Image: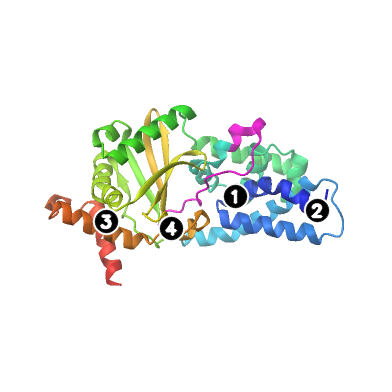
Amino acid sequence: MSRVEEFEELRPLLFSIAYRILGSVAEAEDAVQETWLRYDLSPTRPTSTRAFLSATVTRLSIDVLRSARVRREQYIGPWFPEPLLTDPYQDPEHAAELADSLSMASLLLLERLSPLERAVFVLREVFAFGFPDIAAAVGRSEAACRQLAVRARRHMDAGRPRFEADRKEREELAERFFDALKDGDVDGMRQLLAADVQMVADSGGKAPRWAGGIHGIDQMCQMLDQLLWPFLGIGGVVEPRQVNGQPGAVFRDRDGKVVNIWTLDILDGRIQAIRTVSNPDKLGHMGPVADAWALLREAQQARRHMAGPEPTDLATTPVREFERETEQENRT
């Protein structure tokens, strides 16, 4: 088998390792490409191509993550991983670990770990690498890697919910939610939302967002009424999808361009949180990205034309703050 064939066979694994360490599709793809260049230029063939390439992509990802941490500290608003619709690597023996480690919640927990802890956890707990290979990949002794793995597992276990819904139950609940959303069925949605449901957005300061997020059923339904349903009224589309291995949806404009991504956190038979990614820099790998500001202006105009003046008791709500930001953007 040629080097190209060996590499292409392992590319899905390499990307999956890099993505879980970095939380970025673009950075993971760059790390995989740099891994290929180093492998192609290597004067000798390694004893184990899988071990060599996995170690190389891990070291590159650790270096990128260390520099990325500085950028993330300066990030405007909440930072979420770049959404991923399909994991290219599949392994039936570790399907549960792969799926769990891909979720937004797990990737955000991984952000709490040091780069070394994160890499060791990903290689050991997700991909079941042996400690000799992990030690070679991160440049530490096996004993040190075992300690890193224990610390990382402890941090991850402490942050996870104590009960997670069955996958089939989550998918059925998400289907009901998005059906109710598209039908404008407020009562149907209320039955599926936790009383303290939250919606938090990652816009990076480059797309519309609401100050402080949305908290509680009343604010959530108000946001849907004033922002989402007008968006659907001007041809917007909600496309339910698995996002990072969990229920979610891709929102598109009438031309099929990506507006944002939603993922749902479901526990105890209710939607506890909705995370949205609207930063266009994090959506480009999914295709053409819509002008979210222009869409919001159009949706606002459509709503005002249909509904007339806004009630005064909405003047200080998160939605009104969201619209004030839009008005400011219009002026600039």
Q: CA distance from mark 2 to mark 4?
A: 37 Å
Confirm whether the magenta stretch covers residue 192.
no
Residue at image position (26%, 36%) is: 185
The residue at which mark 1 appears reads as 19
Q: CA distance from mark 3 to mark 2?
A: 52 Å
The residue at which mark 2 appears reads as 3
Q: Are marks 1 and 4 in contact (CB under 8 Å)?
A: no
Report whether 142 appears left or right of 106. Answer: right
* Along the viewing direction, whichever of 211 and 309 lies nearer the viewer: 309
- Camera-side mark, 1 or 2: 2
- Camera-side mark, 2 or 4: 2
Question: Residue 249, percent across and down?
Answer: 42, 44
Residue 203: quarter of image: bottom left
Q: Which mark is residue 125?
A: none
Confirm whether the magenta stretch covers residue 91.
yes
The residue at which mark 4 appears reads as 279
Tell me which amino acid carries mark 1: Tyr
Tell me which amino acid carries mark 2: Arg
* Sooner in the amino-acid sequence: mark 2 or mark 4: 2
Task: Please report the bounds of the magenta region as a residue range.
Answer: 77-98
Q: Is residue 37 above or below residue 23?
A: below
* Sooner in the amino-acid sequence: mark 1 or mark 2: 2
Mark 4 falls on what kind of element?
Answer: loop
Residue at image position (61%, 51%) is: 115
**Crowding at mark 3 (Cα within 10 Å: few <14, some 14-19, many 20+):** many
Mark 1 falls on what kind of element?
Answer: helix
The residue at which mark 3 appears reads as 299
Instruction: Name the residue furthest bottom.
Output: 332
Q: CA distance from mark 3 to mark 1?
A: 35 Å
Q: CA distance from mark 4 to mark 3?
A: 19 Å
* Sooner in the amino-acid sequence: mark 1 or mark 4: 1
